[in-house]
Image (spheres, rainbow, N blue to C red):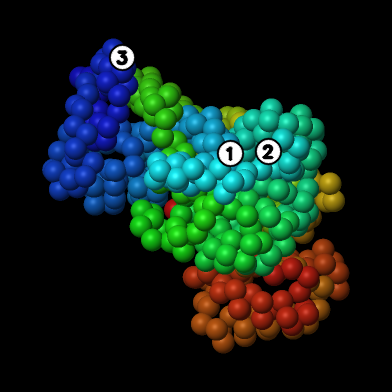
Amino acid sequence: MAPKVLVSDALSETAVQIFRDRGVEVDYRPALGKDKEALAAIIGDYDGLAIRSATKVTARLLAAAPRLKVIGRAGIGVDNVDIPEATRRGVIVMNTPFGNSITTAEHTIAMMLAVARQIPEADASTRAGKWEKNRFMGTELFNKTLGVIGCGNIGSIVADRALGLKMKVLAYDPFLSDERAVKLGVTKVELDELLARSDFITLHVPLTDRTRNMLSAEALAATKPGVRIVNCARGGLIDEAALAEAIRSGHVAGAALDVFEVEPATDSPLFALPNVVCTPHLGASTTEAQENVALQVAEQMADYLLTGAVQNALNMPSVTAEEAAVMGPWLRLAGHLGAFVGQMTDDPIGAINVLYDGVAGTMNLQALDCAAIAGVMKAANPEVNMVSAPVIARERGIRLSTTRQEKSGIFDGYIKLSVVTDRFERSIAGTVFSDGKPRFIQIKGINIDAEIGRHMLYTTNADVPGIIGTLGTTMGRNGVNIANFTLGRSAPGKDAIALLYLDAPVPEPVRAELEATGLFRQVKALTFEVG
């Protein structure tokens, strides 16, 4: 029986025809994306679901879809899909991470030109019968300095286009290597230097705890007077109230925003201000981009349903069915090892080195490498998956070294992952016990045996009395329960570490309280994706 796919959002007829031409039965019902009851009533008849942003794939919908094998999102954003629930139910979630890159980059350049020449206001004035030629004095982009915050896939395209306009380009990106910066023709700088030197600033980073309100009132005050700000990435990267005040004061000359903290954006302190250009999240809205992602998702879904090939999956590596049963725990381990060093490393990473020992070295190392790289890079970009991570790493000049060796210790096998920056090398090792659960077994050369939980706290300190008591007392006093507590040291009185597996995240004031004791060299809250 041919696999059956439901298309519940608007996709092009060409994309729908791809399913038919490949031998997949397809029902095109784009109105269902907005009718969750009707969708839930029929979803149980389908092997695949092709969507855009209107369809909300909730736990309730997935519970009604026992036959569903794959969800394909035409576009990059998957906020409308409950990925953990889909994973638990064995449903692959695919997206099309690079289909909108050119379109979004071009919209950024268009917004920069619009705010530089005050085009929307000049257009409205002229249509109103005025001829205010002297009112709209613009500024050239030629020879100006553009600061690109986030020089990944889209940011690097923006940089290339800006260089074509004969602008000078500064780039801030913790993952941008010196070699990659030279190849792109940009000058790599720290954020404070970018803010101080840029005539225009454009953001191309995901919204995370690290990047939320990264252009705060303080950051805006540190910018060059007369700067113009462009954001076509994610709402929430800029403190909109602070930006409005900076424009009113004259410190910021203008802004162009395609994204807002709250969308749909029906009200904003920026709307009434002069020389502010606003568009309703149009970055990916071109005929070409929408067609590209629709065709791509149709091809990917058909490939999986007919051959088992997996592309651009957010919750499954590219492995065969036979490999998946054995490799599952090791793939999770590789991701956890990467997540640890990724969350611990703020410096630009030049290289990722992975050692596979014993039984780990007999597996599909390409898939394990992808899981490890994705773990490292998700700390800065949660949208990275096991398919896109190696591509993004290569684009940023990060070198990958993989070594396989025979069994060399007490474990049947283990994985050791190291990241190398200009200042240091950080490493961690782990294994999978007979119960199928990954464990950390070594950090910074110190042997440990640590169970991995969703919420953890990592500390480093000198091996002195009082550390355990301070950690336990502080957590208890603040109502944070410790599920597991692991210690290790290099030698008596020397370097020591602790890993606390907690039932809930460590509140920032509690972490700061520990740091303020002066007993710890590092106090870091960590999060891991566990089942």
Mark 3 vs mark 1: which is more N-terminal?
3
Mark 1 vs mark 2: which is more N-terminal?
1
Question: What residue does disc 2 label?
Answer: 141
Q: Where residue 138 sits: x, y (%)?
A: 62, 44
Q: Amino acid at mark 2?
A: Leu
Q: Determine the secondary structure under disc 2.
A: loop
Image quarter for residue 334?
top right
Q: Where residue 69 sits: x, y (%)?
A: 31, 34
Instruction: Answer left or right for 60 relative to 185.
Output: left
Instruction: Name the one closer to the observer, 393 or 11.
Output: 11
320 up-or-down from 59: above or below: above
Does the image show residue 161? yes
Instruction: Name the one closer to the observer, 109 or 9.
Output: 109
Q: Callout 1: few (<14), some (14-19), or many (20+) C-alpha neighbours within 10 Å?
A: some
Q: Where residue 343 sits: x, y (%)?
A: 65, 55
Q: Callout 3: few (<14), some (14-19), or many (20+) C-alpha neighbours within 10 Å?
A: few
Q: Amino acid at mark 3?
A: Arg
Question: What residue does disc 3 label?
Answer: 22
Q: Are marks 1 and 2 in contact (CB under 8 Å)?
A: yes
Q: Looking at the figure, which quarter contains the N terminus?
A: top left
Task: Identify the residue at image location x=22%, y=21%.
Answer: 25
394 up-or-down from 278: above or below: above
Residue 113 disc label: 1
Task: Identify the residue at image location x=67%, y=34%.
Answer: 162
435 up-or-down from 295: above or below: below
Q: Where residue 222 sits: x, y (%)?
A: 72, 62
Residue at the extreme top: 21
Closer to the camera: disc 2 or disc 3? 2
Closer to the camera: disc 3 or disc 1? 1
Q: Determine the secondary structure under disc 1.
A: helix
Q: Distance of mark 3 from mark 1, alpha carbons?
A: 44 Å
